[in-house]
Amino acid sequence: MLATYRRVQAWAEKRLPALTRYRRPESLPITLHRRRIYIVPTAFGMAFTVLLLVMLVGSLNYGNNAALLLTCMLGSACTTSMLIAFRSLNGVRLTAIRQGHAVAGEPMVLQLVFTGSEREHASVHANMEAQEETFPVAAHGETLVSLTLATSRRGWQPLPRMKLWSNWPLGLFHAWSWLHPDQSVLVWPHPETAGPPPVLPGSQDIRHRLHQGEDIAALRDYRAGDPLRHIAWKHSARHENLLVKDFEQPESREEWRLDWRALSLLSPEARISRLARWLGEAEVVGRPTSLWLPGEEIGLGHGRSHYVHCMNALARLP
């Protein structure tokens, strides 16, 4: 019986125009109201209704006032639960959607920002692509709900429809509404797994720092194999252990100037994947990079914000 009920409900949601009137994308914020919230009895609610009818017939047939009073009380509780199920969604507002970062083929984390009305909304369920989250929405409060979105290719990906529903409080009625925000998320390109390092131009600016002579960078504990001439005898006399002079070694800081035009032998998607890999490798070691793309040039920089800027530029390429 339960399986049959679910099939009928799924058919009604797909075929009845009144239940799917909000299929077009909508701009944020989206507010749920009485014209877009639908409610039907659950399988448990239908069985409970049949039970109430049997109790009503029995109490009237035998003239049992106590049984009739109990039937009326249960019937009123059933009707009240229908109103509460409706009010658990009425007034809920989706105000914003915050996207995370993900490369193509990996799930992207989305944060849905819901705000409540003048009353609390208990036990609200959000469904998107076979995943479900349950959350309450406080009165005049803000609730963050995290859902993951499957990605397949780089670029702008529109968000699918989402379903908000609730069976609160007794599970006798199922209230639901559809949300289809007019918003897309940006998916980063997938880096290639392996490949050559970037070819650096001969005129690249490489800066060196060198400490010469007796310019000491630091003092450290003696380790076996350290030259005796590096031992700081005067400082060691004031400590229990031997101290060794640590001289700063020459350090080179290479800058990767990544250029779309230098990869002319590759296809456009292969260029994007290689540039994405080089950007990821530079981000790991903190190497400064610059990026030249058709129609956009990103100057030298490093850090997380610079990496995000470059990956977004690659993802937006046609």
Image: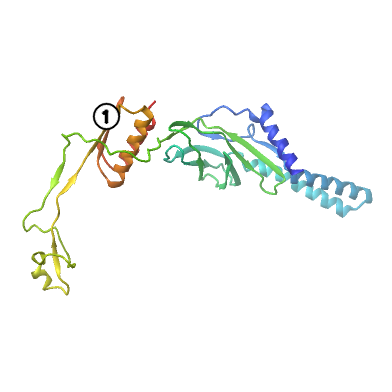
Give above or below for 181 relative to 225: above
Nearest the eye: 253 or 77: 253
Say which residue appears at 70% left-offset and 33% top-offset: 11
Depth check, front residue: 23 or 61: 23
Point out residue 71 in the picture as x, y percentages from the top left corner: 82, 49
Q: Is residue 160 visible?
A: yes
- Which quadrant would residue 242 be assigned to in this image? bottom left
Image quadrant occupied by the C terminus: top left
Residue at 31% x, 27% y is 265
For disc 1, the marked residue is 262
Q: Whole-percent x and y of residue 280?
A: 33, 41
Left or right of 169 on screen, residue 55:
right
Q: Residue at x 48, y 38 (%)?
A: 97
**In the picture provided, is 55 more to the left or to the right than 120?**
right
Look at the image and name its color scheme: rainbow
Image quarter of the N terminus: top right
**Please, which residue is most extreme toward the bottom here?**
240
Q: What amino acid type should be assigned to the residue bearing mark 1? A: Ala
